[in-house]
Amino acid sequence: MSLTDSLKSFTLPAAPDFLIEARNHDLGKLSIAGVDEAGRGPLAGPVTAAAVILDPDNLPRGLNDSKKLTEKRREILFDEILKTSHVAWCSLNAETIDTINIREAALRAMEISVSHLPIKTDYVMIDGRDVPRALKGIGEAFVKGDARSLSIAAASIIAKVVRDRMMVEADKHFPEYGFAGHKGYGSQKHRDAIHEFGPCPIHRKSFSPIKQMVENIKP
């Protein structure tokens, strides 16, 4: 069966659960981290990754893929995850993204997040298709992992809230772009502001339409 056929036949659970973690606990992997990132697609701001080791005996209620939660619910769960779990995160700025590309920046942020956890991990569950190089020995990638695993869902919430807060702060410094609203994604309002004011220091110069704009104004 091809990868495409496999993905077509893959059925997600109604909500993320702790089954994958439980199976690995039974295999002796007692310290299990979920890892996810936020901010691959925006035209501005950092990419942020988070790593979370949940307490199996104290799982926050209502964990889900961050994209399926309201902003208010994410904020509540953010605090609950911090209270009950081991958590670390890393944000890499637009300059780094432009230098090494967004994929490498996201993977590097994941590596750094795991390395900053307060306890050693036996097994790392990563959302997506890629396992960062530094995690090859202990990491496994899960397509749509934030919809399958509570650990990855928790990491998605941490990464999303941290990045959103950074973009709200950026809005105070560059209010003309409306970062607090669209968080750096390519909304029409954001694109219009870029064309009116040009890119600011936190815009990703390697991303279209910013790359095209920069090339057009070169002498």
Image (cartoon, grey):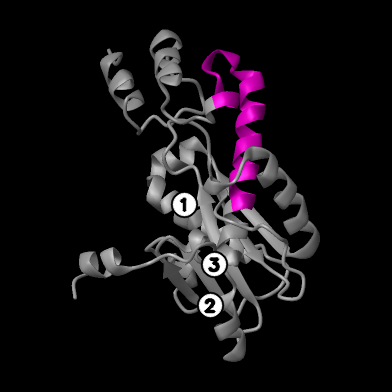
Res 215 quadrant in image: top left
Residue marked by disc 1: 106
Residue kind at label 2, given as amino acid type: Ile
Q: In the rendered image of this protein, does residue 218 appear above or below residue 139?
A: above
Res 186 quadrant in image: top left
- Marks 1,2: beta carbons within 8 A: no
Report if residue 24 lies within the magenta region: no
Residue 35 x %, y %: 55, 62
- Marks 2,3: beta carbons within 8 A: yes
Specify the farthest residue to the front.
Answer: 14
Q: Quadrant of the N terminus?
A: bottom left
Report if residue 176 lies within the magenta region: yes
Residue kind at label 3, given as amino acid type: Ser
Which span of residues is magenta-colored?
Answer: 157-181
Specify the farthest residue to the top.
Answer: 196
- Comparing marks 3 and 1, which lies closer to the viewer? 3
- Marks 3,1: beta carbons within 8 A: no
Residue kind at label 1, given as amino acid type: Ala
Specify the farthest residue to the left.
Answer: 2
Residue marked by disc 3: 149
Q: Residues within 10 Å of mark 2 (few under 14, many from 20)?
A: few
- Sequence-first disc among 3 and 1: 1
Helix, strand or loop status at disc 3: loop
Residue marked by disc 2: 20
- Find the distance from the CA under tag 1 to the CA under tag 2: 24 Å
| Near-viewer residue (205 or 149) | 149
Res 183 quadrant in image: top right
